[in-house]
Image (tube, grey):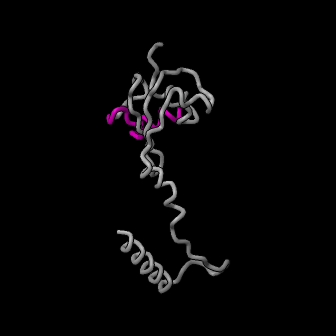
């Protein structure tokens, strides 16, 4: 099979919704191939390791086979192996563990005193985690 561009491969194995989204992510240094930044036109080879940073999580993939057309979700494991470490996937649950302070509707913004109390509470929580 002929060589495949990186942006086209990422689109074909459904890592990005559109090819232009893939190209933008590559240009903004959110995608690395074998631990090196690449251009959208870089050619993908079998065995390459691709890391894609989306928000706080860095997903890792290994190229198993080359494909040029977009694949159905069931066919993706034939072409791409997800090797993302569990520690990275655990970051997906982090926002659910944040504190939400309930305020009655119409009470407006916190006063200076309330804000200091919130800051003290948050500092105590983050110091316990460290």
Residue 97 vs 6, above or below: the answer is below
28 is within the stretch colored magenta: yes
- The residue nearer to you, when weighing 32 against 78, is 78
Residue 89 vs 44, above or below: the answer is below
Percent position of residue 126, x then y: 39, 71
In the rendered image, the residue lying farthest to the bottom is 113
- The residue nearer to you, when weighing 75 against 112, is 75
Instruction: Name the residue: 36% across, 73% down.
Output: 127
50 is within the stretch colored magenta: no
Instruction: Name the residue: 51% across, 58% down.
Output: 93
Q: Is residue 34 visible?
A: yes
Residue 71 vs 101, above or below: the answer is above
- Quadrant of residue 70 in the image? top right
Q: Is residue 19 visible?
A: no
Instruction: Name the residue: 46% across, 83% down.
Output: 117
Instruction: Name the residue: 67% across, 77% down.
Output: 105
In the rendered image, the residue lying farthest to the top is 1
Q: What range is drawn magenta here?
A: 19-36
Percent position of residue 66, x then y: 48, 21
- The residue nearer to you, when weighing 118 against 65, is 65
């Amino acid at each position: 099979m002929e060589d495949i561009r990186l942006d086209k491969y990422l689109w074909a194995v459904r890592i990005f919704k559109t090819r232009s989204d893939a190209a933008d992510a590559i240009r903004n240094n959110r995608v690395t191939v074998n631990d090196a930044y690449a251009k959208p036109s870089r050619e993908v080879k079998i065995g390459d390791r691709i890391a894609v940073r989306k928000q706080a999580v860095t997903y890792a993939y290994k190229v198993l086979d080359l494909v040029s057309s977009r694949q159905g979700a069931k066919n993706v494991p034939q072409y791409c192996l997800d090797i993302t470490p569990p520690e990275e996937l655990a970051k997906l649950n982090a926002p659910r563990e944040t504190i939400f302070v309930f305020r009655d509707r119409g009470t407006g913004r916190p006063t200076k005193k309330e804000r200091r109390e919130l800051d003290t509470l948050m500092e105590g929580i983050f110091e316990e985690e460290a």
